[in-house]
Image (tube, helix red, strand yellow):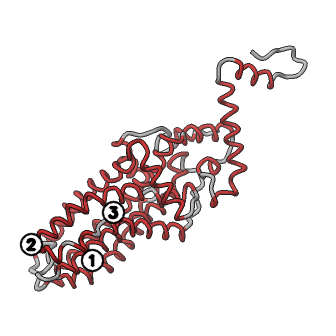
């Protein structure tokens, strides 16, 4: 039998922070073309939503609104946080189909798509992240510039918890086969374990790519302005939208793939997924039974899951010292052979 552990793109063991960030790119490479194409479509849809709001706020190349437009600028900020989380969640759900392949090799069948549930849970994640920016709706108008600054500071105190804790929900829908509400709760539990390790690494990955996006976006705008003099704020908004579209078409798929890597690693670190997968391959049990977490959406896999659990317990009994091991060996003694279990 082929050794799935050696063929896997992501090691079957808990990973370090650096390995997790690298694993996001590894997952992306399994379906680079499709994920980037979908990232471009999602980024285009996001810019179609944000462009009218930028225009109403009269945002120019300085990324600041015109005088008297702080109210609509606050709406733009909230919607921006929401659409960004929705886009990353959607792409994370698509990339999660590749989880069996990145863990067990390219010959392993992908997970079912479950598109409606992925869209629903990505929308829920978007609402949660958008709600974390609520200060933009309250402070800028009465306090003006000071309010805008306080809203920015306050949001970046609330937002990391929202973004970090709900980010594994889309992979949970596809890999663990949970419904949207159950996936959101399981995401919070998984990301909150070990001192919110997965949540903080997700935020770290976002910040790393935020620097990349800002650098590329600002460089693109500066390059365009070097050869082209913008006649109006509308043209500024079009240039900014095009620059962010190009940058996010790559960034969103990578961040979605990071969610997949974080979800799988969290299960390996806290639930022993790597051990269960190795044993399922050795025992000839389908990986479906191990990847799916028992719940309403995976009831059809419970019998296979019981088989995998039973196989694991049998292996543990064989390896255990003392009476348990002797009893297990005695049960497997061939009748009439005269050999006792020791």
Q: Residue at x 52, y 46 (%)?
A: 103
- Which of 151/170 is in front? 151
Residue with the mark numbered 3: 250
Whichever of callouts 2 and 3 sits on the residue coming sooner in the sequence is: 2
Q: Secondary structure at mark 2?
A: helix
Q: Is 26 situated above or below 324?
A: below
Q: Disc 2 vs disc 3: Cβ atoms closer than 8 Å?
A: no
Q: Residues within 10 Å of mark 3 (few under 14, many from 20)?
A: many
- Which of 246/294 is in front? 294
In this image, 148 relative to 210: left or right? left
Q: Quadrant of the N terminus?
A: top right
Q: Residues within 10 Å of mark 2 (few under 14, many from 20)?
A: few
Q: CA distance from mark 2 to mark 1?
A: 31 Å
Residue 165 image position (x, y, % from top left) = 40, 55
Q: Quadrant of residue 69?
A: bottom left
Q: Is 93 situated above or below 287?
A: below
Q: Secondary structure at mark 1?
A: helix
Residue 146 image position (x, y, % from top left) = 12, 68
Q: Residue at x 31, y 74 (%)?
A: 79
Residue 267 image position (x, y, % from top left) = 50, 45
């Amino acid at each position: 039998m082929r050794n799935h552990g050696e063929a896997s793109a992501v090691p079957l063991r808990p990973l370090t922070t650096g390995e997790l960030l690298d694993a996001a790119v590894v997952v992306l490479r399994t379906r680079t073309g499709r994920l980037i194409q979908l990232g471009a479509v999602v980024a285009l849809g996001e810019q179609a939503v944000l462009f009218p709001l930028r225009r109403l706020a009269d945002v120019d190349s300085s990324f600041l609104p015109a005088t008297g437009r702080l109210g609509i600028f606050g709406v733009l900020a909230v919607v921006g946080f929401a659409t960004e989380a929705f886009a990353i969640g959607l792409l994370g759900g698509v990339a999660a189909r590749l989880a069996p392949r990145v863990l067990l090799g390219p010959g392993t069948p992908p997970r079912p798509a479950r598109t409606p549930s992925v869209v629903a849970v990505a929308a829920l994640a978007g609402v949660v992240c958008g709600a974390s920016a609520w200060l933009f709706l309250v402070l800028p108008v009465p306090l003006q510039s000071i309010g805008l600054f306080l809203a920015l500071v306050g949001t970046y105190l609330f937002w990391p918890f929202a973004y970090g804790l709900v980010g594994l929900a889309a992979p949970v829908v596809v890999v663990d086969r949970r419904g949207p509400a159950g996936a959101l709760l399981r995401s919070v539990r998984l990301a909150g374990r070990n001192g919110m390790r997965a949540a903080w690494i997700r935020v770290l990955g976002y910040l790393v790519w935020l620097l990349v996006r800002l650098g590329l976006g600002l460089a693109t705008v500066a390059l365009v302005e070097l050869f082209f003099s913008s006649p109006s704020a509308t043209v500024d908004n079009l240039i900014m939208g095009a620059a962010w579209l190009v940058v996010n078409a790559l960034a969103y798929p990578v961040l979605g793939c990071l969610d997949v890597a974080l979800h799988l690693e969290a299960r390996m670190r806290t639930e022993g997924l790597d051990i269960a997968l190795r044993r399922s391959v050795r025992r000839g049990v389908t990986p479906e039974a191990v990847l799916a977490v028992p719940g309403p959406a995976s009831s059809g896999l419970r019998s296979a899951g019981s088989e995998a659990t039973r196989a694991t317990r049998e292996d543990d009994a064989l390896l255990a010292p003392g009476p348990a091991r002797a009893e297990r060996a005695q049960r497997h003694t061939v009748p009439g052979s005269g050999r006792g279990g020791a």
